[in-house]
């Protein structure tokens, strides 16, 4: 079984969409293994978005993701990474397919409601940033 990290970003939290987004992912047949609400600090944000360091939008991204609490979660299932990314839609909500999470809830390319791991290898690294093995519940 494959795992993926999912973050519900500040814009979605501000609009009370956390539960709806989690529910939509569970409706895809994915199992929720971990869930926590946290206020990401700058150090964690920079580690999480390290791949974007040096890009013009990096500082804005860090400022945005640390602006208010988020939900971090881990989902598991067959092809979880692809299933979640398909359910979320493309990064830019304006270009996301109708019926996807980002098309329905995203505001713009930065305030696009969610983040998800882009590959199983990335998922392992990202999950470890937010959760210990003891925090992942299998049932």
Image (cartoon, rainbow, N blue to C red):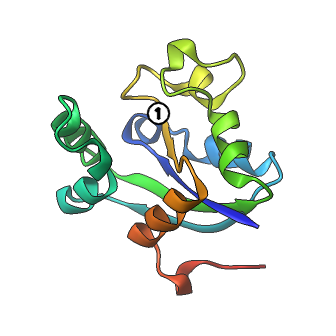
Among the 4 quarters of the image, the one containing residue 74: bottom right
Where in the figure is residue 45, as x and y percent of width and height? 27, 54
Where in the figure is residue 11, as x and y percent of width and height? 40, 34
| Of 75 and 58, the residue lying toward us | 58
**Residue that appears at 39% across and 29% down:** 111
* Local secondary structure at mark 1: loop
Q: Is residue 130 left or right of residue 4?
A: left
| Quadrant placement of the N terminus | bottom right
**Residue that appears at 18% across and 56% down:** 42
**Residue that appears at 31% across and 47% down:** 51
Instruction: In the rendered view, tell whether residue 48 sits above or below residue 14.
Output: below
| Of 6 and 55, the residue lying toward us | 55
Among the 4 quarters of the image, the one containing residue 99: top right
Where in the figure is residue 127, as x and y percent of width and height? 49, 66
Q: Which residue is mark 1?
A: 15
Among the 4 quarters of the image, the one containing residue 59: top left
Q: Is residue 2 left or right of residue 115?
A: right
Badge 1 density bin: few <14, some 14–19, many ≥20, Cα 10 Å: few
- Marks counted in the figure total 1
| Quadrant placement of the C terminus | bottom right
Q: Is residue 52 left or right of residue 43?
A: right
Where in the figure is residue 25, as x and y percent of width and height? 71, 47
| Of 127 and 21, the residue lying toward us | 127
Instruction: In the rendered view, tell whether residue 103 sits above or below residue 124.
Output: above
Q: Quick one: which residue is furthest to the bottom in this view?
A: 134
Q: Is residue 95 left or right of residue 31?
A: left
């Amino acid at each position: 079984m494959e795992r993926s990290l999912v973050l519900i970003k500040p814009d979605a939290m501000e609009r009370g969409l956390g539960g709806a987004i989690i529910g939509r992912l569970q409706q895809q047949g994915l199992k929720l293994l971990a869930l926590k609400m946290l206020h990401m600090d700058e150090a964690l944000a920079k580690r999480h978005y390290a791949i974007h360091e040096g890009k013009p939008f990096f500082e804005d991204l860090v400022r945005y993701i640390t602006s208010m609490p988020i939900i971090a979660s881990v989902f598991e299932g067959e092809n979880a990474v692809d299933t979640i990314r398909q359910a979320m839609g493309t990064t830019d909500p304006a270009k996301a397919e109708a019926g996807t999470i980002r098309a329905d809830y995203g505001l713009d390319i930065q305030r696009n409601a969610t983040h998800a791991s882009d590959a199983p290898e990335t998922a392992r690294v990202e999950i470890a940033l937010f959760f210990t093995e003891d925090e992942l519940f299998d049932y």
